[in-house]
Image (cartoon, grey):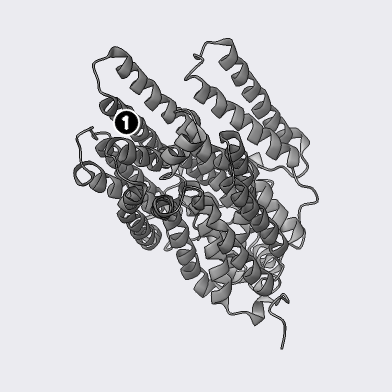
Amino acid sequence: MASIFSPRTDRQVPTGILLAIACVAQFMVVLDVSVVNVALPSIGRDLHYSATGLQWVVNAYVLTFAGFLLLGGRAADLFGRRRVFLFGLGLFVGASLLGGLAQSSAQLTAARALQGLGGAVLSPATLTIIVTTYPREKVTRALGVWSAMAAGGGAAGSVLGGVLTSELSWRWVLFINVPIGLALGVAAYAFLADARLPTPPKRLDVAGAITVTAGLAALVYAIVNTDTHPWGSAETLGVLAVAVILLGAFFVLELRVASEPLMPMRLFRLRSVTGSNLVMLPIGAAFFSMWYFLSLYLQNVLHYSPLRAGLAFLPMALTIIVGAQLSARLVSRIGVRSMLVIGTIVATAGYVWLSRIGPDSTYWSAVFGAGCLTSFSLGLLFTPLARGATADVAPQEAGLASGLLNTSRQVGGSIGLAALATVATDHTKSLLAGGQSTPAASLTAGYARAFEVAAILTALGCLAAFLVPRTIGKLDLPVARPATADGGAAEPDAAVSTASAASDGDRPAATEAVERGDLGFESA
């Protein structure tokens, strides 16, 4: 009998096991963006975070995830999905353990940054497992399962975080990854076979990943720091200058220096790619902030326990999944652009409703309906954004385009959360300084102001949706030939050849699904 610890090939393993490995890993990565939200008040008290500094518990993870996500995808191409999957999983689990043991805000922030790096390495491999495993007639259903698991991960994190924080400690929102990760690592080692591109990238753009991550971190720090240093102060202007220099260096590296650029700028020549990413930036900013501010409102104003606050998010988790499944069925009929317009309009309505919260409101009158409507819109946006971002891209770059979309979500989320947290804090402080508002009313007014700005952001996303070509995503229309690196169109035979090679010689139809844009992506 073969040892369970001996790696096996994909043909010897039921595809359901491989799908389970991919879904559980992705769920865990997405979960960790939001699982800390309900625990934030407890973390802030125990580790003495400031009102604006508390957002670093979320943003430290998001920034490194965003900065190294594309690098992680390239690493999987170069070193093989199994090896990279196990490395990313080990890094993620180790960082979770360190975070749970943290005794200061600096230690926890550092551990969360390391966690984000592990997630950036792990996440791209999960999608690769699916698209190189399933044949064409089954890949859409598999991606639907993967999308639903990922979509529910963001909201389910709030529920799980509430249970763990109330019954054990906030530290267990991080410790919980350790046993799950160890079990997942055993399964991946036993059942997952390596697969890589036949012509993988020769070099990794490490310099690009470092400069963009450092630049974004400096930008977020400058925004958050305006709480104590005004925009015109020397310190804030100095940090902004550093951010500009680092981000400028990143673009120079990508355009002129890197032989294998992290972010090939040629992809932005495609309207579908540009439009989808421009929609994703404000959507990411709005939705990252929703969970953050609702968690604080429920606990700081309505005085919910962490457990009760976590359970309050459960209906929202379910509506995300419903929206994602409905969107997957509608997008092929009405197209990507129409679905993006509908989703962003619903999101705008949801945020306007959320901005009506008050210090004397109740969960049922102010949070339940508005939160479910907004979460439903998030589910509606999953499939059309992913399909729009990958529909016209050459098959060998479909994974890169999908990773670029995910990066836009993380970048929008990190900058948006920093900006909205600063807006909320400034408004709260101004009301308290006036002496005419109670602490609860001032806090609520700050959260409401953040939701008003989020409504403006989703409305801007609606306008950006019109950049996506009207015909993208409709199955009754001929699929455009994917663009090649030089801006031309790939020959069909070449596309099939590349797809076959990328799937280890046996699965051209799976990669054709990527070419069509049948991809999901994870929740905020």
Q: Which residue is mark 1?
A: 452
Q: Is residue 139 above or below residue 12?
A: above
Q: Quadrant of residue 77?
A: bottom right
Q: Position of residue 323 (x, y in %)?
A: 34, 56
Foreground of the two, 304 or 144: 304
Instruction: Determine if residue 127 is in view.
Output: no
Q: Position of residue 182 (x, y in %)?
A: 62, 64
Residue occupying image coordinates x 32% and y 37%:
297
Foreground of the two, 405 or 300: 300
Q: Is residue 22 above or below residue 398?
A: below
Q: Position of residue 31 (x, y in %)?
A: 49, 53
Residue occupying image coordinates x 26% and y 39%:
302
Instruction: Determine if residue 501 is in view.
Output: yes
Q: Quadrant of residue 366?
A: top left
Identify residue type, mark 1: Glu
Left or right: where does residue 236 sit relative to residue 323? Answer: right
Helix or strand or loop: what does disc 1 sit on? helix
Residue occupying image coordinates x 53% and y 70%:
20
Picture quarter with the N terminus: bottom right
